[in-house]
Image (cartoon, grey):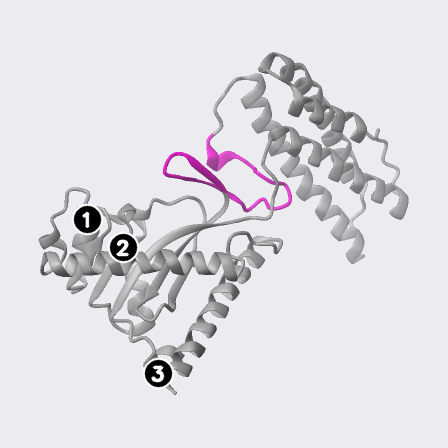
């Protein structure tokens, strides 16, 4: 709104594209996640016994679990990995059993620290069961586990599996950015799951109406957004020129008033790519280093705000 008041960007021309911001996690191999589960749950069990005097009986399997995890990583083939996975699953199952017993022994107390410990045991116990289940299905039952049913990190469990162009796999969250002619980021939406670009057009256009009180006159979008339905949605909102970077069977004259306008908007759209690259190189938008989904959102939005403040400062210096 400040940029609008200062006439830096009136929102009459917009370009939209998506990118992925990765969570701060290691590669989500099942063997590493099983070891993480055993390691974290055992640490919590020690804390319950040594600091709070809870008489929970358990065995520390961390060294054995680590050996199995390392063995899986260095195994040359599936035949060598299979018995190691079976033993690691057995270790994890035993550790989960210890935590279930600990939950029953932990008293309900007004103590904040004891309540926090009980909450951690339940939280990581549930995640460990999910990791055990997905590994058992994949390794033992040779089942393909859908991405939306996977836990890719017990520390950043909100992380989504994002597959781009059917080849690149990222672990984090998809964000959709709207840029203006001034290089400002006019809007940023942090998404859950991996919705198709074609499902985001209506939402992103309507958000421009909420921000500026009217729709832009010209919109340029990446080829992934292209569809006849999305062109119809944009035209219904009185947007004069709509440019999809890939036509997907659409004619240039259906999208824009002329071929000249289409080519001009297509070149304009490329600017959002450089904007995203700048955000990632200079403002840390490649990977979020803050913990938790709420902090993830704060990290992304603070990076965008910082970039916008610098852009506005440059614009004002250029005008003086």
Position of 262 relative to 7 (above/below)? above
Q: Nearer the viewer, residue 7 or 275?
A: 275
Distance from the alpha carbon under mark 3 to that under mark 2: 26 Å
Position of 66 relative to 254 (above/below)? above
Q: Residue at x 11, y 48 (%)?
A: 251
Q: Nearer the viewer, residue 254 or 265?
A: 265
Q: Secondary structure at mark 1?
A: helix
Whether residue 156 appears in magenta in the rendering, the answer is yes
Which-is-in-front pick, marks 1 and 2? 2
Residue receiving disc 3: 5
Mark 3 and mark 2 lie on one chain; the one further toward the N terminus is 3
Q: Is residue 312 left or right of residue 306?
A: left
Q: Nearer the viewer, residue 64 or 44?
A: 64
Q: Is residue 58 left or right of residue 216?
A: right
Q: Residue 295, how many percent across, how many down? A: 58, 58
Examine the rendering and report whether any part of residue 109 can be seen: no
Asked if disc 3 and disc 2 are in contact, CB closer than 8 Å, the reply is no
Q: Residue 153, how many percent across, how many down? A: 60, 40
Q: Is residue 183 left or right of residue 217?
A: right
Residue receiving disc 2: 221
Q: Looking at the rendering, in which quadrant would you find the N terminus?
A: bottom left
Q: Nearer the viewer, residue 165 or 204?
A: 165
Residue receiving disc 1: 229
Q: Secondary structure at mark 3?
A: helix
Q: Residue 151, how many percent across, how many down? A: 56, 37
Distance from the alpha carbon under mark 1 to that under mark 3: 34 Å
Image mark for residue 136: none
Q: Residue at x 27, y 47 (%)?
A: 223
Mark 1 and mark 2 lie on one chain; the one further toward the N terminus is 2
* Residue that protrudes farthest toward the bottom in the picture: 320
Asked if disc 1 and disc 2 are in contact, CB closer than 8 Å, the reply is no
Span of residues in magenta: 146-170
């Amino acid at each position: 709104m400040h940029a609008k008041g200062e006439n830096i960007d009136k929102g009459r021309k917009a370009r939209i594209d998506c990118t992925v911001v990765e969570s701060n996690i290691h590669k989500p191999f099942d063997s590493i996640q099983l070891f993480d589960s055993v390691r974290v749950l055992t640490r919590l069990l020690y804390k319950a016994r040594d600091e709070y005097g809870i008489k929970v009986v358990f065995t520390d399997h961390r060294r054995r679990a680590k050996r199995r995890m390392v063995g899986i990583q260095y195994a040359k083939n599936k035949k060598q990995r299979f018995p190691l996975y079976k033993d690691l699953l057995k270790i994890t199952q035993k550790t989960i059993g210890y935590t279930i017993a600990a939950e029953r022994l932990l008293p309900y107390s007004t103590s904040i620290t004891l309540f926090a410990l009980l909450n951690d045991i339940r939280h990581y116990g549930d995640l460990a069961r999910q990791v055990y289940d997905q590994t058992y299905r994949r390794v033992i039952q040779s089942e393909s586990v859908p991405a939306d049913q996977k836990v890719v990190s017990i520390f950043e469990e909100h992380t989504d599996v994002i597959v781009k162009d059917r080849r690149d796999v990222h672990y984090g969250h998809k964000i959709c950015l709207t840029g203006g002619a001034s290089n400002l980021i006019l809007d940023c939406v942090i998404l859950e799951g991996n919705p198709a670009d074609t499902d985001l057009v209506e939402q992103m256009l309507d958000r421009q109406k909420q921000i500026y009180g009217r729709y832009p006159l010209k919109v340029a979008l990446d080829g992934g957004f292209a569809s006849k339905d999305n062109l119809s949605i944009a035209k219904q909102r009185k947007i004069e020129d709509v440019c999809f970077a890939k036509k997907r069977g659409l004619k240039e004259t259906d999208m824009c008033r002329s071929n000249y306008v289409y080519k001009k908007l297509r070149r304009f759209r490329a600017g959002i790519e450089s904007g995203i690259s700048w955000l990632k190189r200079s403002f840390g938008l490649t990977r979020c280093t803050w913990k938790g989904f709420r902090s993830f959102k704060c990290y992304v939005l603070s990076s965008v705000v910082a970039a916008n403040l610098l852009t506005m400062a440059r614009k004002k210096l250029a005008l003086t």
